[in-house]
Amino acid sequence: MRIDDHPILGKAERGRSITLTVDGSPVEAFEGEPIAVALMASGHRVFRYTTKQKGPRGVFCALGRCTDCIMIVDGQANVRTCVTPARDGMVIEKQFGRGPREEKG
Amino acid sequence: MKVDDLIICRCEEVTEGEIKEAIRLGLTTMSEVKWLTRAGMGLCQGKTCGRLVMSILVRETNQPPDEVKPPTFRPPTRVMALGALANGEKETE
């Protein structure tokens, strides 16, 4: 769900339509909006799994402080998706602990 | 779920029970609790859990809040790549 007309912020100004690749699947987004917005709008809720307890995490603070929404963006781990603008063709992957899912096991 | 199982430091997954145990061992400052439990040592550098750890310290040690020694704050204040510091590049955000 997206908010098109906000009672305080007004009408949404959006960039052109672009496509991200999230864990191998295409996700429609608007250029310049935070990656997390495109993920939430397309039904993604789990952005990563934690290091110790392997628990699922997603958006928590949504303003770049808490680092709960970090994912692997274009091969770079620990990217805060709530404050990183979406660009066409970005490759985004779930993060497992501090990096990609380990192949073994 | 027990209170002691609640995660206080979300980055390093440190529970209230682990922080209480550290205090039971005799630690009385934010830095000491951080060194032992890693609460506040993760990616967000204590921005989320700092106040919670402080409140647990106040409660468990009966110190007045303004007498609990705060942790050491050092730059950078926001998450950034070491490469950006080393090369003087603009932070990408």
Image (cartoon, rainbow, N blue to C red):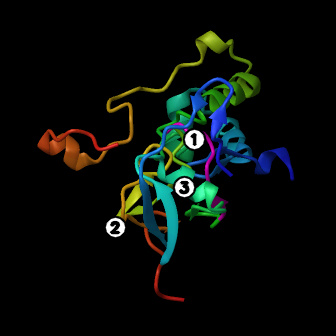
Position of residue A57 measured from the top left corner of the image (x, y, whole percent): 63, 57
The amino acid on which the numbered mark 3 sits, given as a three-letter code, is Ala
Position of residue B31 measured from the top left corner of the image (x, y, whole percent): 50, 31
Residue that appears at 34% across and 65% down:
A74
Q: Nearer the viewer, mark 3 or mark 2?
A: 3
How far apart in space, not on screen, are marks 1 and 2 (Cα)? 22 Å
The amino acid on which the numbered mark 1 sits, given as a three-letter code, is Ala
Instruction: Name the residue tied to disc 1.
Output: A62
Q: Chain of mark 3?
A: A
Instruction: Name the residue tied to disc 3.
Output: A38
Q: Chain of mark 2?
A: A
Are the residues under badges 1 and 2 in a single subunit?
yes
Whichever of labels 3 and 1 marks the residue nearer the N terminus, that label is 3
Instruction: Name the residue tied to disc 2.
Output: A75
**Helix, strand or loop under label 3:** helix
Residue that appears at 62% across and 55% down:
A40
**Helix, strand or loop under label 2:** loop
Which residue is at the front of the view, B70 or A75? A75
Is A23 in the magenta?
A: no
Position of residue A100 measured from the top left corner of the image (x, y, whole percent): 44, 72
The numbered disc on residue A12 is: none
